[in-house]
Image (cartoon, helix red, strand yellow):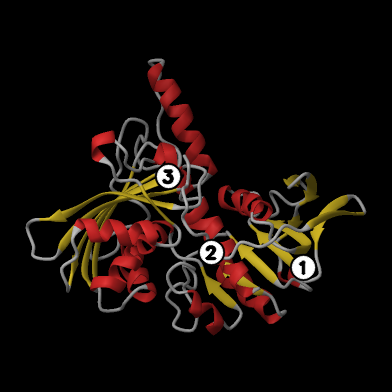
Amino acid sequence: MDAGPAAVIGRQRPVAVQQHGRHSVMEEEMGKHVAVAGATGAVGEVMRKVLIERNFPIASIKLLASQRSAGKKVTFGDDEVEVELLRPDAFEGVEIALFSIPTEVSRQIAPEAAKRGCVVIDNSNAFRMDPGTPLVVPEVNPEKVAEHQGIIANPNCSTIQMVVALKPLHDAARIKRVVVSTYQAVAGAGHRQIVELREQARRLLAGEESPPRYFPYQIAFNLIPQIDVFQPDGYTLEETKMVNETKKILDPDIDVTATCVRVPVFYGHSEAVNIETERKLSAEHARGLLADAPGVVLLDDPDQQRYPMPLKAAGHDETFVGRVREDTTVANGLNLWVVSDSLRKGAATNAVQIAELLL
């Protein structure tokens, strides 16, 4: 898909690639010593790609993972780098670390990395609602990066794409309430779930049984209205994240309610978003605001059947918005359809953009 003229936050100029011993690393005068924790996972793999694609200035790179992956060699650009064991002393000399590791591991390791002078950009849920930790989407609240005390939280994937789309509308008309239903791809759950959907679909189409392994129910040709664990109030943790994170990032006075559903799509989360604003915002005005918003690509031409789809958003960093129309049941309501690649803008790219702001 042609991403169009959407602004991209914080791109860096190209850097030279030089040979240093067995591996080539990117180096420039202001190059940073960087680590990727969870480098062999689904998000970590994309983090490695995005660092190269965006020409992030790197003086040295460490790729870290659990005991299961330590010692393996994985690609970084044109080179192979040996994966090291994730442990506190691995962050000696590291300036910026991108984390994509389980929440409980982040809680233990991130403070240790910060003690060693490293700024951690954490993709887990460990620190997102910590009052002392900035929760950042560069197109929405880049100024919050300056408030970090060694750790910056990367928001939930479904929250990121929604607030990118809502930011220009909120600035123009003040959003009072958001009702969102998400249709989330299996890539957001990890590598094993991607494989499960692929194998399950193949077996079922061949007339074979394929019981679920990593999802609670069959995901192929099915929808599962549960992402993460249920809370006492009946909402899932994923739904609670969307509520709390949107308030922290965009505006604590916004009322948010969410329903999150796993769908049999490999890459790309989709969201049906209904908003109510304080001031009237026509669909035409909203389209103009979205067309000019950083990180947004407006695809909204019903006559030509042009609208966002996960099939087309996969592999791109932008948030795609379409189906913009007025909600006729309230005075100041709008409906939007929002799609983005959950591994890229929903995780890896947003983290690298935060790292660019640190530069």
Residue 39 circle label: none
Is 355 situated left or right of 323 in this image?
right
Please state which amino acid type lies under the numbered disc 2.
Ile
Which is closer to the viewer, label 3 or label 1?
Answer: 1
User: Which residue lies under the disc numbered 2?
Assistant: 9
Nearer to us in this view, 159 or 89? 159
Q: CA distance from mark 3 to mark 2?
A: 21 Å
Please state which amino acid type lies under the numbered disc 1.
Gly
Residue 12: image x %, image y %? 66, 62
| Among the 4 quarters of the image, the one containing residue 180 | bottom left
Residue that protrudes farthest toward the top in the picture: 206
Residue 238: image x %, image y %? 35, 59
If you read the primary sequence from the N terminus, does the residue marked by circle 2 or circle 1 appear first? 2
Residue 291: image x %, image y %? 36, 56
Residue 343: image x %, image y %? 51, 50
Q: Secondary structure at mark 2?
A: loop
User: Which residue lies under the disc numbered 3?
Assistant: 268
| Among the 4 quarters of the image, the one containing residue 106 | bottom right
Q: CA distance from mark 3 to mark 1?
A: 32 Å
Is 247 situated left or right of 281 in this image?
right
User: Which residue lies under the disc numbered 1?
Assistant: 31
If you read the primary sequence from the N terminus, does the residue marked by circle 3 or circle 1 appear first? 1
Nearer to us in this view, 182 or 323? 323
Residue at 71%, 71% in the rendered image:
88
